[in-house]
Image (cartoon, grey):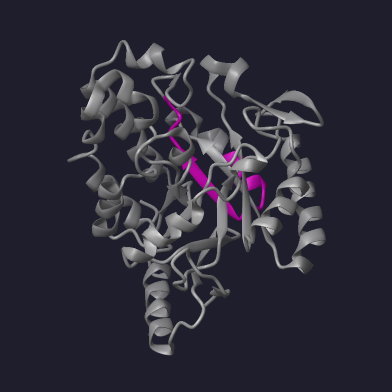
Amino acid sequence: MNNHDYEGFDKTGTRQAPLIDYHVHPGYSLDAAHRSIRDYCRRALELGLKEICFTTHLENEPDHFHTNNEVRLHGRRVPSYQLHWLEEYFKEIERARDNFTGDGLIVKAGIEIGYSSHLEEFIERVLTGFPFDFVLGAIHSVQGTSISNLKDCPEYFRLCTLEDLREDYFGTLENAVKSGFFDCLAHVDLYRRYGYDFYGEDIYTIHRGFIEPIFEEAARRRTGLEINTSTARRGIEEFHPTREILQLAVEAGIEIFTVGSDAHSLDELGDHVSEAISLLEEMGQQVYGFSRRQPYTLLPPGLSESEDKKQEAKHKRLESRKNIKS
């Protein structure tokens, strides 16, 4: 089994899986600080991270071309659908691997793709054309309108009822899972970020009765779930997803979990990932990394042989689901 075993302790002195950050936006993302992959790797070493996975935004919503559908390349804005920028992205990641592997930092090439059903042909072209380690699927927009940024979200939230949001968001999430494109689902309750201001406390329960079958399908397809810690710096209670939703994922059979800060600047890198790892371990779950789209467990040091065998059996169960795509 391809486990990565490191020394690590949480704030209470308890051994835990190594510190990793699997949701990091370098300067290619327009909404991120203009900092290089090398800058982030240097900061990762300072923080004691063992793995860093870069997940540049990829959006291609026609209604928001000027705000979401571009990336930054050599200081200039270029359309994200002109995929030559990904060639430069991979070259920069490869240089970082050459420079930092000797220092003990594992550097992964990932991407965060904003899913809409009409983009599936484009997404497939991207994923078959480049050797990603890790692919995050995100629902940033519903009905063609972004719900992930403060400027655009009122356009949707003011016109739609809570029931509209429930049907639109979870319908899109279901399609994303069934597409089979994604290794993990990012910030699966992202609607909480700004939805609370429009719907109040009811925003915390709209998943009930809708997300459970989606999680069951995700588990069947071996799709994982991200613990996204960006809520902590936004003053939002609980990580994405909430503990209730995380528990539903576990009960549905999801076994692959990653952690990510959703960093858009150097000072956000690694933010609260230790707490997210502790939360997963408290719930009896393992933290996972990815290499060339294949998951592996990140085991705490000192894991007993019997516990390791349990993890190997778990890994084999996951492997048996590999060929289930529909």
Q: Mark yes or no: residue 216 visible.
A: no
On screen, residue 167 above or below 284: above
Q: Mark yes or no: residue 56 visible.
A: yes
Residue 311 location (% of width, % of height): 41, 77
On screen, residue 58 versus residue 225, left or right, reads: right
Residue at position x 53%, y 22% in the image: 61
Residue 192 location (% of width, % of height): 34, 31
Residue 265 location (% of width, % of height): 64, 38
Total marks shown come to: 0
Residue at position x 42%, y 73% in the image: 315
On screen, residue 128 above or below 49: above
Would you say residue 86 sits in the magenta stretch? Answer: no
The stretch in magenta equals 124-141
On screen, residue 32 versus residue 250, left or right, reads: right
On screen, residue 111 above or below 159: below
On screen, residue 145 above or below 100: above
Residue 303, image quadrant: bottom left
Residue sitting at the far front: 12
Residue 153 location (% of width, % of height): 42, 18
